[in-house]
Amino acid sequence: MFEHLPGFRDFYPDALARRTHLFAIFRESARRFDFQEFDTPILGPLELYLEKSGEEIASQLFHFTDQGGRQVALRPELTPSLARLAAAKAESLKRPIKWFHVGEHFRYERPQKGRLRSFFQFNADILGESDSAADAELIALLVSILVECGLGPEHFQVRLSDRVTWSLFLESCNVAEDKKGELLNVIDKSERRKPEATKEALEQILPGESDAFIQKIDELKAIDGVEGVIERLLSFSRSDDDEASRRAKEWKQLMGRLDALGCRDHVVVDLSIVRGLAYYTGFVYEAFETSGENRALAGGGRYDHLVGKLSGGSTDLPATGFAIGDVTLSNCLEENNLWPAS
């Protein structure tokens, strides 16, 4: 008897009913926040994904040469397609652009709990708005979706961090600009690696300095409140209007907006969240399950230059967004008995 491929799923009527219920929450929540739904082909040019994430991502994709000789791939994520669509009609689109998408994605990875080769994902993005109000609105939408699913503070929290703060920290350590990306990637992976592996990776980038640098990293990660972040930023500052001072004000503004939107109680400051992808440029965050296995339910952040990169520099738009995968969220709802009986 034939079975589905590894990492793929069949949806019998009861499973499909649950998926439909979840998608309805995604769509209703997004429309309440005045987001518009869009769609894009599931098959795209391989080059689009390589341009965004680098050649190394090719091993994680379902890609092939089609009958026209084109290198194509099943979409592993939505952001490159979103950037392509926005860049193509940037001059005629009313701003801010607030779009959402629900669709299937594919990654050629080893199947494991919470991670499959075929999965559905909800994406919400705001383009054309650089103010932290857009970041706050998206975090509020993320919280709204999870609460609508029946999850409360005892089930999840949104861990908030900032790439700008990390960049200013690296500057204070006199790290060369060309090493920042590598270091942020190592710092991001340090939460999932053994300390020895992190030290080895740091030693390759900063020979002879790994021990001292790890201590500085741990000190920054230990900050657990916005007051501590602001204090640390001001310690980097040399004037009232330099980047560190401005960032301290933006942290304060963001937290105030989250409070005004009624979702502050679900958000914690956690600078260990770095989001290793190099295109992130500002506030970043991940929603984590706090009960059970402490799995990530969603993640996102600001990526102000990606549209420009993927459009060849012809169009640039500030942008921020997040994604929720259906696999870990469905598992969380199942384990907490939060699926509706009907």
Image: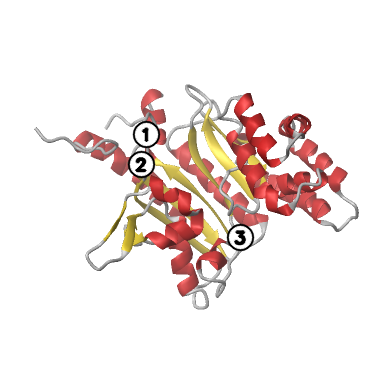
The percent coordinates of residue 93 (x first, y second) are: 49, 73
Horizontal side of 111 relative to 272 (left or right) equals left
Disc nearer the start of the sequence (3/2): 2
Report the number of discs. Answer: 3
**Residue for point 79% across, 31% down:** 212
Disc nearer the start of the sequence (2/1): 2
Pointer 1 residue: 330
Q: Is residue 96 visible?
A: no
Q: Is residue 77 visible?
A: yes
Q: Mark 2 and 1 residues: CB-CB less than 8 Å, in contact?
A: yes
Q: What residue occupies the far right of the structure in this picture? A: 239
Of 18 and 169, nearer the camera is: 169
The percent coordinates of residue 34 (x first, y second) are: 48, 59
The percent coordinates of residue 227 (x first, y second) are: 79, 38
**Residue for point 77% across, 31% down:** 219
Residue 22's disc number: 2
Pointer 3 residue: 304
Residue 213, quarter of picture: top right
Horizontal side of 140 relative to 41 (left or right) equals right
Of 57 and 218, nearer the camera is: 57
Distance from disc 2 to disc 1, alpha carbons, whole Å, reads 8 Å
Mark 2, Cα crowd under 10 Å, few <14 / some 14-19 / many 20+, is: some
Q: Disc 3 marks which amino acid?
A: Asp
Q: Disc 2 marks which amino acid?
A: Leu
Above or below, 155 against 118 in this view is above
**Residue for point 64% across, 55% down:** 133
Of 172 and 197, nearer the camera is: 197
Q: Disc 1 marks which amino acid?
A: Ser
Distance from disc 3 to disc 1, alpha carbons, whole Å, reads 31 Å
Describe the element under mark 1 as helix, strand or loop.
helix
Q: What residue occupies the far bottom of the structure in this picture? A: 92
User: In front of the other: label 2 or label 1?
Assistant: 1
